[in-house]
Image (spheres, rainbow, N blue to C red):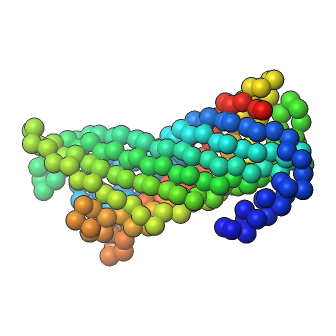
Amino acid sequence: MKSLFTIALLFLSNSALANIELRAHYGQLSNGPEDFNKAMDVLVVNNPDIKGPASIGGDLVLVSAGGYVLGVRHETFAQKVNGPVTVSNNPMTASAEFKGSRTSALLGYRLLNLPMGYLGLLAHYGVGQKLEYSETLDNNGAASTSKYTISKEDSYGIAIETGMTYGFLLIGGEFGYTSFKGKDVKDQNNGYIASNGEPVEFDLSGPYFKAMLGFVF
């Protein structure tokens, strides 16, 4: 990770700074945590599945005159699902919530870096992630909530980014693939959620997109 920043800083130090971009974005991950969903179905029959969650976030990006990109990104994820379930042959209602956040370092290169727009490659590497899952089971008004922590997360990915600028205004998009995994899923009693005797991953890896709106200085 240190070498990644060293290379990026060398790129930027050898080229004049062209601009600074502040960007807000809305995104969508395409895949949900399939293995986790299957493991929860064993505990709670027909447990509502977590799908690919939406995200909102922001970037601070430095772009050199030579087209090199260095930045930082923070984004949050959230999703709520509910539905009828069965626990020990008893019909109940389940309400589940997934939420998380991720902070990533950005490094890229713009193949086209023009006053009116850009097209380039962008890599991201997670430097801080947090994932949580909770579920409330309601049996005719008698409710109980279980909370799950997800640790040992790691994430990285690569994307194509493109955008148009209109004066100080920037409108853009990003399309790529991310590896985004949490390897230790534990309940409030510190017990692992397992499938076939192995701890289950909370894996959100897959294609994603982001729509962006921001300012160029």
The quadrant of the picture occupied by the N terminus is bottom right
Question: Can the viewer see residue 17 in this picture?
Answer: yes
Report the number of numbered marks: 0
Seen at 40% across and 46% down, the residue is: 99
| Residue 54 locus on image (x, y percent) | 50, 40
| Residue 60 locus on image (x, y percent) | 67, 42
Question: Can the viewer see residue 38 in this picture?
Answer: no
Is 145 left or right of 13, judged from the image as shown? left
Seen at 65% across and 49% down, the residue is: 72
Seen at 44% across and 49% down, the residue is: 100
| Residue 164 locus on image (x, y percent) | 79, 30
Is 101 left or right of 68, judged from the image as shown? left
The quadrant of the picture occupied by the C terminus is top right
Give the residue at the far bottom of this rendering. 197
Is 4 left or right of 33, judged from the image as shown? right
In this view, the residue in front, 151 or 44, is 151
| Residue 4 locus on image (x, y percent) | 73, 65
Please say if 173 is above or below 90: above
Please say if 144 is above or below 166: below
Choose top left, top right, bottom left or bottom right for residue 10: bottom right
Please say if 138 is above or below 41: above
Choose top left, top right, bottom left or bottom right for residue 167: top right
